[in-house]
Amino acid sequence: MQTTFQNLAQLWSQTKQPFVKYSTMCAYRLTLRTHLLPRFGQMTQIEESDVQDFIIDKMSRGLSKKTVRDIVAVLRAIVKYGARQNLFSWGNWQLYYPTMESGNKLPVLSLNHQRKLMTYLIKQPTPRNIGILLALCTGMRIGEVCALEWTDVDLLHRTLRVRQTVARIYNCDKGATEQIFSTPKTKHSFREIPMSKLLFDALNIVKKQSVSTFVVGSSAYATDPRTYRDYFVRLLKKIQIPPIVFHGLRHTFATRCIESQCDYKTVSTLLGHSNVSTTLNLYVHPNLQQKKRCIEKMSKLLGVVE
């Protein structure tokens, strides 16, 4: 017995819902509505060539390889579910993701621009500015920064506890966005981060000004990440620093840690990565000088006289 992909997706969503976070299910439904159902909704069988054409089309429209992979991962999961229920055939597709662009670099502030930004934030430690300093000094994600409460800040032991995140999620049922609190991205994202003296001093000043349970902002509610991104863009323009996405502050923190020769496992733990290979793949790219030093160290260890 076979069914349409649209009906299968509905069954899969109902089965999946009890086992995933609310925000994750909203993301699945948005992926289905925006990308998968318009292309595959009425199909009762999806061939490898259909999916390959879909990949080429989406990437040619400007979607990144990662985004398209994530979309196809949802497609695979639904079709595999259908195969297990004898409702849909599964052909174990072998798919190819073309490289549409090359040489992309992570958005990272230059050392001079980072110093300029941090100098401004240190001189103006306000409930609004502190979130930017938090991201630069801890590598926290914007959702984690906006969800941080004063109860998560231990000024006595100079540590921060990351235990929740906030995001604006599109609810397909309501047809509108809503602000949702949830647990961090993975179990490894629950973490404790030490404060630098610079961050500790700034937090102490902001704590005396704060009228909110949240570290960032002065409202009784958490600052919306989208609103905070807009403020960050305006601040960079105001102090004449080239534009960079807010997530670039996390990349900047990680890059400076690696440049300071912090061990990779510690950096990975601070960032809340699920494994150190994620950190290595993102941030560890030795240049020619580092490679030369490595070869020289190895030669000295061997002690072979030429």
Image (cartoon, rainbow, N blue to C red):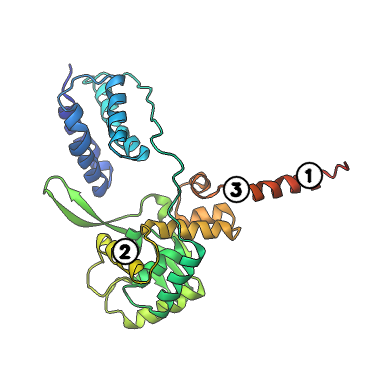
The answer to which of 235 and 247 lies nearer the viewer is 235
Tell me the element at label 1.
helix
263 with respect to 203 (left or right) = right
At a point 48% along the width and 75% down the height, the residue shown is: 198
Residue at numbered disc 3: 286
The answer to which of 30 and 286 lies nearer the viewer is 286
Percent coordinates x, y for residue 4 in the rendering: 16, 23
Kindly report the distance in space between the C-alpha atoms of the residues bearing marks 1 and 2.
49 Å
At a point 41% along the width and 67% down the height, the residue shown is: 134
N-term-proximal mark, 3 vs 1: 3
Tell me the element at label 2.
helix
Residue at numbered disc 2: 233
118 with respect to 55 (left or right) = right
Residues at marks 1 and 2 touching, judged by CB atoms closer than 8 Å: no
Q: Name the quarter where the C terminus is drawn.
A: top right
N-term-proximal mark, 2 vs 3: 2
Residue at numbered disc 1: 299
Percent coordinates x, y for residue 143 in the rendering: 32, 59
Toward the top, the furthest residue is 1
Toward the right, the furthest residue is 305
Q: Residues within 10 Å of mark 3 (few under 14, many from 20)?
A: few
